[in-house]
Image (cartoon, rainbow, N blue to C red):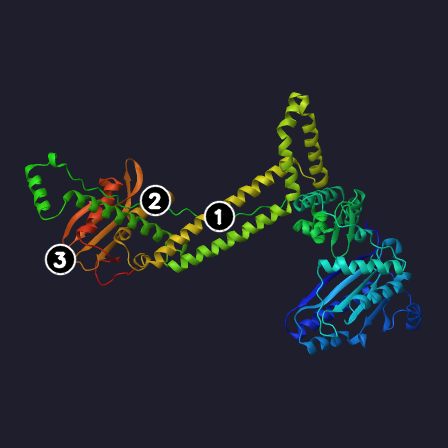
Amino acid sequence: MAKGIVVKVWNVKAGSSTRSAASQISDSIDYIENPEKTGVPLNIANVNQLGNELTYVTNEIKTVAGLYVGCRHISDISHATDEMMQIKEFYGKLDGRVATHGIISLDASESDPKNAAKLMELLNELMESIFPKHQVVYAVHTNTENLHIHFIINTVGLDGKKIHMDKSFMRQVMEVEVNKLAEKYGFTPNETWKKEKVKDPLPFPQRKMMLRELVDIAIEQTDEFDAFIAYLRSVGLIVNVGRNITLQTEEMPFALRSGQLGENYSISAIKKRLDSKYDPFKPVVAGDYYSAVMPQEMANIVPKKMKAYKDMSKEEKQEAIHLLRLGRNPWSEARWDNWQMQKMADELKNVGYVYKLVRHYSSGKDHANTAMEKIIELRKQISQERKDVRSLMKEYKPITSIYQEMKKYMVRACLYDVYGYSEYRDDFERYEKLCHRLEVGYGKSVEEVAELVFELNTKFEYLKAQDKELNAQYKAIKAFVENGKLKTVSDNYSFFHAIGHSNALYEAKHYGIYASDMKYIIPADTDIKIRVVTRPAMKDGKPTVETVIAIIDKDGHVGDEISSLTMSEKEFNQKIYEIQKVYCIKSCDISRNNITENVRRV
């Protein structure tokens, strides 16, 4: 327990409006004048008796439901907010730090309510010493084990100057003056303020880890908040409890608020941990947001090969020489044609993949923007679940960190326990001690915690992988939209997609859907129609789908007809590519009837 008097201050901030500043000041004054903050009423008979006891205080003083209440440079304490705002408005300083809220607390051994009058005298003299031109409202509270006085200071003084209090001011001015007045009024000064400031022997991160471990062990050893505080004090920590818990060892130059140790160490978090430490682990949620969308199988090109000159026939040699005389190189042209064909095939494959993505995420509507919006929505859901998993990781870190430490000793402990290797006895004892902490402090077994750690890590990585894949798919669609290529996919069927054989084959293989369909493809700027019939079939003793393509001229005569059953998938795709090239098919319409008028533009 800290010995001696203590002072703390913090800023009250507001926006730029008059009402906002006034509201903040009013709320702060209402807080310190709240009768519920009086744990032990002061039993003052009347204001005159109070005035007799406070010989040094000349301002208005009164009692409010057992509270000592006073003020400085305020003519009517019941209108303190209005009077403070008048000063702010006069100097045009209404925003930012509108007030400073402070508290001076006595040592527990000197916290008899009878000392309230002297505490008010001390506060009044302190304000006269360091803030003589500033309005102040103050009140004594007795609702904690330490008698203390709250004070609200208008940051704008009667002379228009604004208060600026930093750590240097607190240590060099405020703490020095409070200690001096404590001795004057017969209270114990704060010995830590008198000590020469020295550097903490531990680096700050290491100090935080040490304090976290002490707090974690205190939670494991206790079930109630008061017992938790008592345990910390029993192991040598200086602990103060107010709006925050402050922790300090003898070697630390200053105290740390528990909240500075992490999210799990604020007062509310500690109380929650005490209440729920034996609860079963919460389920770890990681939904399935990404479904693999495989690229469409596209035509594979057959490279054009040029024979070596020595292997050519007489006619081939004459043709090659003829081209060379014309300034053309048939060998270079062959390589160029192969490169161009490969580029076209790759482009078709990319378009097919993106088109499949668009159909998948827009529910078959072929709307690129709808697909991208859906991916964004899915990524937001993943992001929320990743945050939830991270929160669980933080919440259970005090428990999982014990398990992580146990893993260091696990193998050697086993060698001692099972095989009797005595040199590992210390490791076995450490391991057993950590097991005991888990079982007694949290009611958990090693196996339960190991399963939790695995589940948290696995599901976090699973969500991360889904998000990465969705991001790649979004970028693929976005790239095609930005360069205009997706318009062909969205507004006009490419010839390969209009045939639809690869899609029917994919659905048959992966989903067991064996389609039956007949349609007519009407290429733009041509005199032909192409009939496409898709139906269930058997190939090599296995169920599949067959696609039959027939070319119909302008007079209705059926010309070339090919079937996917009579050749490999690669050969069939090549035939589709050859038909597209021969008839110069760039875009097309689809009709379900054998008439050119009833078509569907896609």
Question: Viewer-proximal residue, 141 or 555?
Answer: 141
What is the three-letter code of the residue carrying label 2? Ala
Residue that badge 3 annotates: 555
How far across and how far down the image is residue 76, in percent? 81, 77
How far across and how far down the image is residue 20, in percent? 67, 72
Dot 1: element: loop
Is 390 on the left-hand or right-hand side of 155? left
Is 71 on the left-hand or right-hand side of 19? right
Dot 3: element: loop
Disc 1 packing (10 Å; few <14; some 14–19; many ≥20): few
Residue 34 visible somewhere in the drawing: no
What is the three-letter code of the residue carrying label 3? Asp
Dot 2: element: helix
Viewer-nearest of discs 2 and 1: 1
Using the numbered discs, state the Cα–Cα distance from disc 3 to disc 1 in whole angstroms: 53 Å
What is the three-letter code of the residue carrying label 1? Asp
Tell me the tag on residue 288.
Answer: 1
Disc 3 packing (10 Å; few <14; some 14–19; many ≥20): few
- Sequence-earlier tag: 2 or 1: 1
How far across and how far down the image is residue 72, in percent? 81, 72
- Quarter of the image with the C terminus in it: bottom left
Q: Are marks 2 and 1 in contact (CB under 8 Å)?
A: no
Tell me the tag on residue 508.
Answer: 2
- Sequence-earlier tag: 3 or 1: 1
Using the numbered discs, state the Cα–Cα distance from disc 3 to disc 2 in whole angstroms: 35 Å
